[in-house]
Image (cartoon, rainbow, N blue to C red):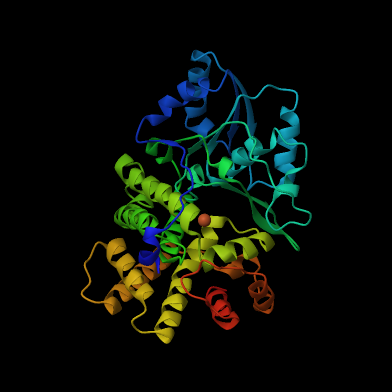
Amino acid sequence: MSTDTAVCFSLLPLPRIHFGPGRLSLLPGICSEYGRNVLLVTGRGALQRTGRLQQLLDAFAGEGLNVFQVNVLHEPSPELVDRTVSECRNRVVDVVVAVGGGSVLDAGKAISAMILQRHPVERFIEGRQGVIPHDGRKVPFIAVPTTSGTGSEVTSNAVISRVGPGGFKRSLRHNAFVPDAAIVDPELMTSVPAPLTAASGMDACTQLLEAYLSPFGNSYTDALALSGLERFGRSFMAACSGGASDVAVRGDIAYAALMSGIALANAGLGIVHGYASSVGGLYDIPHGTLCATLLAEATRVNIRKLRQIDGAHPSLAKFAKAGEVLTGEPCDNVENGCARLLDRLDSWQEMLGFPRLGEFGVQDAELDAIVSITRSKSNAVVLDAGEMRNILEARL
Ligand SMILES: [Fe+2]
């Protein structure tokens, strides 16, 4: 497992990362390093409602920057990326800045990757027919997350989807797509509503746990994942309730999401994210919600399978360690640690009421077909089709 690979591993590049309350003020200055013309990608309007968009535009103007703004209202589709890129064809764009949730960051990342290309984005998406390799040429990109979840501010991929029958949810990926800079300012997250905080937070938690248990992890990704789980565990419920406006609480979850992004980019992800790609392409389920509803059951099935293979499997000790770190309570043996992890995930599921798959139209008759198109080569353990089905069945 990962401790053996610590002497031999590769790491992706990181952006310049600016983390902490008030760090948003650095954005205009960083943009001006790249030129005067900014393409600003934003989301549904939370920035407007809080008055932060106008503050930001004033700050850009004060720095002498020209801003062209586009809005992203959904998880990015090929059509959205191509349309926005074509709108920018006759403009000078020196830098793309995305300020928003995971979908906005992925849209900005994809737009920055496509402005200098002649082909439509679908030609470059992993797993699509007739895919051609991207040469890595892009416009500089700065990511500013306003939710804590995907970790897109530090990853090399943008998730693009076309949802529905025959749909897909897949990545546009290149090492060059790692953002040039990331500004993670917890003050931006204090107004995120509880359901979105819960769903996006569970995405980060899933990424931390799946990267920590990945066979492709190493001591570096393990350390990041554990520190993220610790901060996540101590502040998640507070962020979803009375501590929502507490910058320190939001900072813990933002830190967890940031660590999850670095860990996943270098270690890979497990079965829950396999389903995020397959189920997420077929049904209109927000990514965080899908992670939230599947994580506890997937963890239970993974632990059960590991016990069947070998009661002393080293990955069981890692699950136990995750339980210890997530709850902040030391455990005297592996059995107790695993039980504590499952208890905590079950209790979050119950208290926060994550919606079931059936609420989005997923039916029992479709599960075998879903399982057949689901891939999870970085899962903690190899699951057979029946075990994979059990995860979905339990959350129908
Ligand atoms: Fe995710």
Q: Quadrant of the N terminus?
A: bottom left
Residue 146 is situated, as x and y percent measured from the top left of the image, at: 47, 40
Q: Quadrant of the C terminus?
A: bottom right
In the displayed structure image, the side of residue 105 where residue 303 appears, left or right: left
Q: Residue at x 39, y 56 (%)?
A: 221
- Examine the rendered structure and indicate whether residue 217 appears above or below residue 308: above
Q: Quadrant of residue 306?
A: bottom left
Residue 161 is situated, as x and y percent measured from the top left of the image, at: 67, 53
Task: Looking at the picture, tell me which residue is in the foreground, 129 or 354.
Answer: 129
Residue 236 is situated, as x and y percent measured from the top left of the image, at: 35, 54
Q: Residue furthest bottom?
A: 308
Task: Looking at the picture, tell me which residue is in the foreground, 288 or 331.
Answer: 331
Q: Quadrant of residue 387?
A: bottom right
Task: Looking at the picture, tell me which residue is in the foreground, 54 or 16.
Answer: 16
Residue 107 is situated, as x and y percent measured from the top left of the image, at: 62, 41
Q: Residue at x 65, y 37 (%)?
A: 111
